[in-house]
Image (spheres, rainbow, N blue to C red):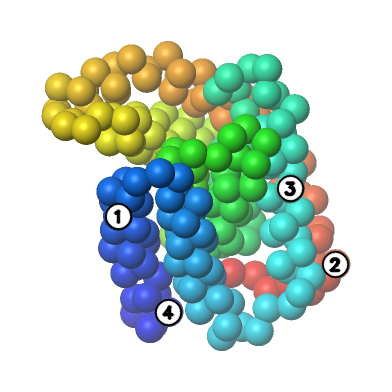
């Protein structure tokens, strides 16, 4: 493995979870500091991954635009809790531009959109959960396990939204608000979170089913037009 890959794994598996746990122990509104630390840790593998191939500013601009689209989509559907296109956009970013880009867009989207929806101790957890979805999409696509067909993407999106995003955020709700959490509380959080997770997963499936092919086609054209390096 390359040094950048090793550093990425260490940050994703050790540094970020440790920051989240530390952030829960701090009093007051220290979640802003926690979110900032998570963003800093995300930037490290992002720059390491791009350093070797000399990324162009136009590529960073495109990722910023994708994040802005996801934020706009979350704002447009504000009246429908859970029914958001964010996960779909993050997955498409991972497929089109790679694992690191998918993680970056997922995490930054949740941080920036919470300026509208409200920052809180849930912000770094949302950043981590959504970032993992983009990371996994990029890795599985590169390995040939995930395909660009809308059926494959929709199934992947529904499962990851329900199992990964919901699987992280449900116990996080217990850890954030219960001084003495136990397994019974976590199990209850999983059970009570099933309806909301199902709506979120259904939304991701629908958005990927209708938007994946045209979006990936346009992103391919952008990469060809601006000479962006294929991953």
Q: Earlier in the sequence, mark 1 or mark 4?
A: 4
Percent across and percent down for residue 38 are 45, 59
Q: How far separated are the C-alphas under marks 4 and 2?
A: 28 Å
Percent across and percent down for residue 125 are 42, 44
Q: Earlier in the sequence, mark 3 or mark 1?
A: 1
Question: Quick one: 230 or 2, which is closer to the camera?
Answer: 2
Q: Secondary structure at mark 1?
A: helix
Q: How far separated are the C-alphas under marks 3 and 4?
A: 27 Å
* Left or right of residue 178, residue 73 in this image: right
* Left or right of residue 151, residue 228 in this image: right
Q: Quadrant of the N terminus?
A: bottom left
Question: Quick one: 92 or 186, which is closer to the camera?
Answer: 186
Q: How far separated are the C-alphas under marks 3 and 1?
A: 29 Å
Residue behind mark 4:
4
Judge depth for marks 1 and 4 and give the one in front: 1
Label 2 neighbour load within 10 Å: few <14, some 14-19, many 20+: few
Label 1 neighbour load within 10 Å: few <14, some 14-19, many 20+: few
Asked whether residue 89 is in view, the answer is no
Q: Earlier in the sequence, mark 1 or mark 2?
A: 1
Label 4 neighbour load within 10 Å: few <14, some 14-19, many 20+: some
Judge depth for marks 3 and 1 and give the one in front: 1
User: Which residue is located at x 46 percent, y 33 percent?
Assistant: 161
User: Which residue is located at x 47 percent, y 56 percent?
Assistant: 33
Residue behind mark 1:
22
Q: Earlier in the sequence, mark 3 or mark 4?
A: 4
Q: How far separated are the C-alphas under marks 1 and 4?
A: 25 Å
Q: Earlier in the sequence, mark 4 or mark 2?
A: 4
Residue behind mark 3:
68
Residue behind mark 2:
225
* Left or right of residue 41, residue 9 in this image: left
């Amino acid at each position: 493995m390359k040094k950048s890959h090793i550093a990425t794994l260490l940050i994703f598996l050790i540094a970020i979870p440790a920051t989240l746990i530390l952030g829960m122990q701090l009093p007051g509104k220290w979640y802003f500091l926690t979110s900032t630390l998570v963003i800093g840790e995300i930037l490290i593998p992002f720059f390491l991954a791009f350093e070797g191939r000399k990324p162009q500013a136009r590529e960073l601009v495109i990722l910023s635009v994708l994040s802005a689209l996801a934020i706009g989509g979350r704002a447009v559907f504000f009246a429908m809790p859970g029914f958001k296109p964010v996960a779909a956009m993050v997955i498409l970013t991972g497929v089109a531009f790679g694992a690191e880009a998918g993680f970056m867009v997922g995490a930054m989207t949740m941080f920036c959109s919470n300026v509208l929806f409200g920052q809180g101790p849930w912000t770094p957890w949302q950043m981590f959960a959504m970032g993992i979805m983009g990371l996994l999409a990029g890795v599985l696509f590169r390995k040939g396990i995930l395909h660009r067909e809308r059926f494959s993407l929709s199934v992947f999106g529904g499962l990851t939204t329900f199992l990964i995003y919901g699987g992280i955020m449900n116990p996080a709700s217990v850890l954030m608000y219960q001084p003495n959490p136990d397994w019974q509380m976590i199990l209850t959080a999983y059970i009570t979170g099933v309806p909301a997770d199902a709506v979120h997963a259904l939304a991701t499936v629908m958005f990927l089913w209708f938007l994946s092919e045209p979006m990936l086609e346009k992103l391919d054209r952008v990469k060809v037009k601006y000479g962006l390096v294929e991953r």
